[in-house]
Image (cartoon, rainbow, N blue to C red):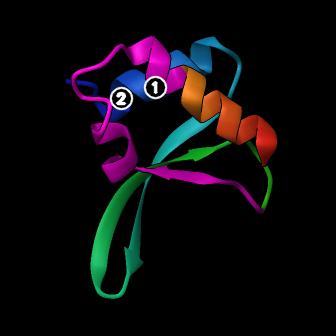
Amino acid sequence: MITREMIIKALEEKGIKAEPTEVVKNNVTLQGIVLGTGNIRPTVYTEWYNSYADEDLEDAIDEIMYKYNEA
């Protein structure tokens, strides 16, 4: 299973600053990863990367980096 910590470590190895975060939306706490630096940064939520649980970590990282570069 791919964990948030595994993704953060892999992103940082590729030069993208990443840190864990928790966000409350509609009284529900979501776990995620904040990417990059600055005041406005994209967040990838746990629910998204759990869909890669049976796949390769590198595939998940590639998808995150693609979305990050689009942002």
Name the one closer to the observer, 24 or 64.
64
In the rendering, at what x and y percent does residue 3 appear? 28, 30
Q: Residue 17: where, in percent of width, then height? A: 66, 32
Residue stretch rendered in magenta on the structure: 40-61
23 vs 14, left or right, is left
Q: Quadrant of residue 41?
A: bottom right
At label 1, which amino acid type do we have? Ala
| In this rendering, position of residue 17 left or right of residue 70 | left
Assess whether mark 2 and mark 1 are in contact (beta carbons under 8 angstroms): no
Q: Pointer 2: what residue?
A: 5
Q: Nearer the viewer, residue 1 or 34?
A: 1
Residue 55 lies in the magenta-colored region: yes
The alpha-carbon separation of the residues under discs 1 and 2 comes to: 13 Å
Name the disc covering residue 60, or none.
1
Q: Is residue 9 visible?
A: no
- Residue 9 screen position, x and y as percent: 47, 20
**Residue at (76% x, 45% y) in the render:** 37
Query: Helix, strand, or loop for circle 1?
Result: helix
Residue at disc 2, secondary structure: helix
Q: N-terminal of the two: label 1 or label 2?
A: 2
* Camera-nearest residue between 48 and 4: 48
Q: Residue at x 78, y 49 (%)?
A: 71
Mark seen at residue 52:
none
Q: Is residue 22 positioned above or below 67 on the image? A: below
